[in-house]
Image: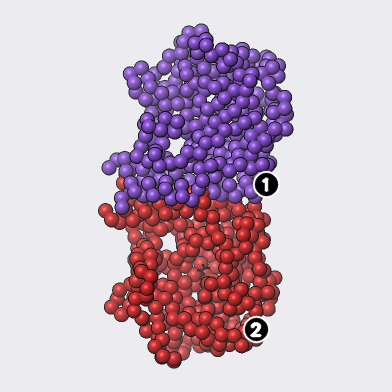
Chain colours: A purple, B red
Amino acid sequence: MDEVDAIAELIINYNELNSSVVTELDEEPSPLEFMRFVAKNTPFVVRGAASDWKASQTWSAQSLKEHLADETVNVAVTPAGNADSPSQNSDGTLVFAKPWEEDQPFPSFLDYVIQQEKQPNIPPGEVRYAQTQNDNLRHEYSSLFAHVPPTIPFARIALQSPPDAINLWIGNSLSTTALHKDNYENIYVQILGRKHFVLLPPHCQPAVNERMLKPVRYVRAEEGSELRMGGEEDGGDVPFAIWDPDRPGENRTQYSGMVEPARVTLERGDMLYLPAMWYHKVSQSCSEEGICVAVNYWYDMDFSGPLYPLTNFVRSVNASRNKD
Amino acid sequence: MDEVDAIAELIINYNELNSSVVTELDEEPSPLEFMRFVAKNTPFVVRGAASDWKASQTWSAQSLKEHLADETVNVAVTPAGNADSPSQNSDGTLVFAKPWEEDQPFPSFLDYVIQQEKQPNIPPGEVRYAQTQNDNLRHEYSSLFAHVPPTIPFARIALQSPPDAINLWIGNSLSTTALHKDNYENIYVQILGRKHFVLLPPHCQPAVNERMLKPVRYVRAEEGSELRMGGEEDGGDVPFAIWDPDRPGENRTQYSGMVEPARVTLERGDMLYLPAMWYHKVSQSCSEEGICVAVNYWYDMDFSGPLYPLTNFVRSVNASRNKD
Ligand SMILES: O=C(O)CCC(=O)C(=O)O
Ligand SMILES: O=C(O)CCC(=O)C(=O)O
């Protein structure tokens, strides 16, 4: 047996012992129940957990515009909804495309998002997504912060820390977040519209075809002009998954066909526990008003114990296989 | 980088993120606190946790002999205290030596154990250890069972099951349990004397020099005769660690020098959480009376989640390296 087989064995062994159907809970877990999921690094969804949050009860396009009538917000702008995604540049090379970031008055940002969603016959222009991921709900959007709990009690108690970041996500169905992973325990809550998650556990790294991609950023040369892809950004190449579980035949590795992605859709008020280091691809559908709004809580993961080093080990063994 | 480096990297990465000093708690953890240790597959010791158990308060050589005055018990007999150990047979081959098992009246078994311990000048004969590991405290020794809790509440609540086995261990300082691992969450409690544990996490498999050994059993041909090593037992070769962290220069692999064994001694009344799949070598010191007595609770481990498949993966990668 060579190490190629060891990776296949790992994927098959995991699949035999674990379901790819995400467990559904009817109510929030206790801290102990939550910790059992953390212990096995396994996701769950709680249907309706956030239904009675003030955000769920009161947010709408209109109320958001009222609350943020005078605010400007940071908006990620891309030609096709591909912020932080592997994308082809003009000569066909795959690069890691970062969005153009622009401050926009919130009401006109939201009008644009809605109009684009509701009038699909108009040729789609650029795609706008408020997705700053920098604890924006406690900063940029702090006037909305009182509408959600300041922390998720079961997670705070189990993980013994306040959330490191609380993020608001506002966009339409043209935005997709490419398959990636974060070193955070993530509690993701849907407020308006729906989110569609495709999930893979950390040991599936050999299936996602991670490549070192040159980072480039879309730029708008002058106000009102179209986006174009800029030159290489500083900071060096970025390791990024180029396999897309929704186009499984493209950019595959010999292991892509073996993994069993878990798929789960969050409806209004649903809450997902997305365990640390899990790969996730996220797409969205809009509410009748034409927006999709979510909030997520990132808690620091515990780097002690065996899982983080073993996840790095899978990557190293796969890298050495690719060098042979 | 080849896969040799990946294993070294794994060991070093783990060592950087984890201490090899076993955490000491002053009191029993709550189920949630316990689950945090289970989640990171990390041991802890609770000093004095069992000090007020009836077993701790009342057991002595005398009281045990009274309780078990009319019982015969199964005793593991070996020439040198090496039950279930890698041992050399007459032609120098390393085999997996299993003990001769014999039913003995409890009082004379205990007298033998004590006498051997207290009179070290008498040339040591065979070594006797009551160590049946088959839930013996609820069967063979059921008259003592009421002297210990029927389960460990924090473990039962966290792991959601009663103990699969509760075992009593009675022996003297000549018995040693060789480095091995069990697929159980283990709560180990010292009642009389002391136990010395040497511990290694599951990913250290490449350091323990696991070999396929022929199983043989010591046999006593007729009553009163000396033990000799019998022929090969049925059931096929047994994978077993042949590296002994207390003789680190012998039978080493290229990784043995990289791992950092954790060492912890349990005194009377101390409790150890020994996480599932951890390698452990166990030796013992006696109470003033010349005996060493412990009780342990095995709870089923959870095979779901990533740790079990990843532990198998380390073994496979190491096996493929050894085949190169
Ligand atoms: O909602 C999205 O578009 C992406 C969410 C995400 O990647 C995250 O919460 O880590
Ligand atoms: O106490 C001993 O000798 C060995 C204990 C052991 O191996 C166990 O509890 O799994």
Asked if residue A206 lies left or right of residue B272, the reply is: left
State the CA–CA distance, disc 1 to disc 2: 44 Å
Inspect the image, locate mark 1, and give the three-letter code of the amino acid beneath it.
Ser
Name the residue: 41% across, 17% down: A230
- Which disc number belongs to residue B185? none
Name the residue: 47% across, 23% down: A82
Query: In the picture shown, does residue A115 fall above or below A134?
Result: above
- Disc 2: host chain: B
Count residues near mark 1 (Cα–Cα under 10 Å), then give few for <14, some for 14-19, many for 20+: some
Q: Quadrant of residue A72?
A: top right
Judge whether residue B81 can be spotted in this image: yes
Inspect the image, locate mark 2, and give the three-letter code of the amino acid beneath it.
His
Q: Quadrant of the N terminus of chain B?
A: top left
Return the x and y of residue B306 as percentages of the image width and height: 48, 49
Circles 1 and 2: CB distance less than 8 Å?
A: no
Name the residue: 28% across, 78% down: B91
Instruction: Classify mark 1: helix, strand or loop.
Output: loop
Residue annotated with mark 2: B67
Residue annotated with mark 1: A30
Return the x and y of residue B267 as percentages of the image width and height: 59, 70
